[in-house]
Image (cartoon, grey):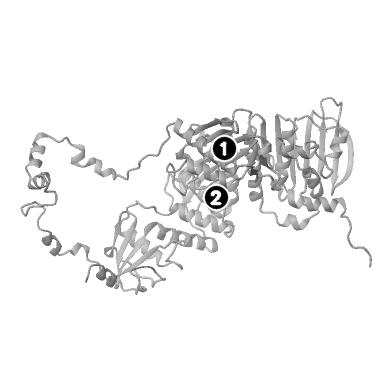
Amino acid sequence: MPDIIQLLPDNIANQIAAGEVIQRPASAVKELLENAVDAGATEIKLLINDAGKQLIQVIDNGKGMSETDARMAFERHATSKIRNIDDLFSIKTMGFRGEALASIAAVAQVELRTKRAEDEAGICIEIENSTVKNQQPVAMETGTSIAMKNLFFNVPARRNFLKSNPSELRHIVDEFIRVAMSFPEIFFSLSSNGQQVFHLERGSLKQRIVQILGNTYNAKLVSVHEQTDYLDITGFVGKPETSKKTRGDQYFFVNNRFIKSAYLNHAVMKAFDEMIGKDSYPMYALFINLDPAQIDINVHPTKQEIKFEDERIVYAFVESAVKHALAQFSITPTLDFDLDGSIQHLDAVSKPFTEDKKSSASSSSLFNTFTKSNQAHFIENKSELGHWKDFYEKPAAQTHFKPLTAGLETDDSSATLHAPVLHAQFISENVFQLHSAYIIVQNDNGYLLVNQQNAHERILYERFLHAVDGKAIAAQQSLFPVSIDLTATDSVLLHELLPDLQQLGFILEPFGNNSFVVSGTPADVSQGNEKNAIEKMLEQYKHFSSDLKFSKREKLFRSLALQQSIKSGTTLSQKEMSGLLNDLFACNTPNSTPNGKPTYMTFKKEELDKMFGR
């Protein structure tokens, strides 16, 4: 029988390697930007067309390459950074695998233009499917321009797996931000389809953070700076009030290389313990510098996960450095008292305690009862409190509720999640509000306890479902259109959501660089609150984005329902409570929120009787 094992051709081997290194346009962006940084560039420009599917071009003013180096750069395992095995464990540069350009050339049409300062002319090389198609001299400035066109043109199956343009552009923006934040001393720009998304001038790390994440952080950054013999930690953390419901603005860099580490993130969270909510995440951009021999950066293809020689030491240093920074700036947990503003206007608070009032109060039997030595437990019969039995026996006409005619079936427990019930018309006299958060309504068997926020969330969610499937939600025109300035990442995200948002009653239009004009909103959004509503919706959407089982539309519906639902602490009128209950039990699934939280519970009268021995 003939031999069956054979060596793969270079172009196929490169395509296999490309599957590991170049997973999407953003992967190529990362490799090309890192190469430009390693070339000593002080200016790096990234140009994108069609979310990188049509064009990704990186132009830098680095040292450039010779003609021979330009050809060699596209060979597999070709690198200028490793000479022997020891170099593998002492790398401080960015890209080093020696497969990036070879992988890119295997799945795209590549044009490389490069020139060194000492050369009179540069060189232009065109490569397609790992084969050099053209090579010629070219006049150009010192530096390198590499353009990759028609990504995955020869692997249509891979191209079909790419996401929508806004989704792929968000991944590109993420990679761009990570490299740009690592090197604030380098000018970076990003243009997409001819429109500039980022223009980042050289400056300090704080200036770069503000340029990328927005001016809201300008006065809300706390400097972190700790130096030890083992490692150095520098960077910034956001003050507790900047914390968000998503992890978006969190960056760890080790020797200027962006990494992902749940372990070190836990160290930062522990440093913020009791300063922020359990479901909130602080902003941070922290740089750890240590001997490359203490880490292994070759454990993951994208090098975003690394191994420390001693993780516990690094964890302790990170936690200590962040705690020390927060303590230096006198940032400590604050007490938050939920005080009704109307209390401030009561006579007892707003008016002076005169001598006449003091004398009147001290002469009362109630005052005397509680100021007698060892008599705190004793209340005289003549106390103005009256007899407790009189209060108990008084008819409580104002708390009488008509039983509901709808059969609210329960199981054997006293407080149970409720199965879907028959739709009933809830009469305003039958309901009342508790703690500005719950609605209580009597039924034949006991009473129903409804969480107003969860109930409204379910109502809104189903309203959005019907709006997209059928008639769109009517929008209310804003008297004065509002402009919203977003970060580049949020701007790309909002572009992606625009068609569905318009179906749900939002009238939004792009207005220049990362700006939008809001000229209409759904009726549920109060006038003057448009900007806040959209910003919170985007934040909530990013919170759901980590859950892969949800579609884009599902995440949007859940985000809007959660963000627009009436919150605990909102006082409702009798009519509003009745309307809420009627809308809830008209839903297809009235007993839970989209996330599975109960909207109401039922309490049986016989179980209440047992509790009181009746």
* Residue type, label 2: Lys
Q: Is residue 514 visible?
A: no
Q: Name the one closer to the observer, 469 or 461.
A: 461
Q: CA distance from mark 1 to mark 2?
A: 19 Å
The answer to whether 571 appears left or right of 82 in the picture is left
Q: Which residue is mark 1?
A: 285
User: Vertical placement of 258 versus 450: above or below?
Assistant: above
Give the farthest residue toward the top. 118
The residue at the point 54 percent across, 46 percent down is: 247
Q: Tell me the element at label 1.
A: strand
Q: Position of residue 339 (x, y in %)?
A: 30, 44
* Label 2 element class: helix
Quadrant position of residue 574: bottom left
* Relative image position of residue 364 (x, y in whole percent): 7, 45
Q: Look at the picture and state if 260 lies above or below 6.
A: above
User: Which residue type does callout 1 highlight?
Assistant: Ala
Q: Which residue is mark 2?
A: 542
Q: Position of residue 83 (x, y in %)?
A: 81, 37
Residue at image location 11% in from the left, 61% down from the top: 390
Q: Quadrant of residue 163?
A: bottom right
Does residue 422 lie above or below 70 as drawn? below
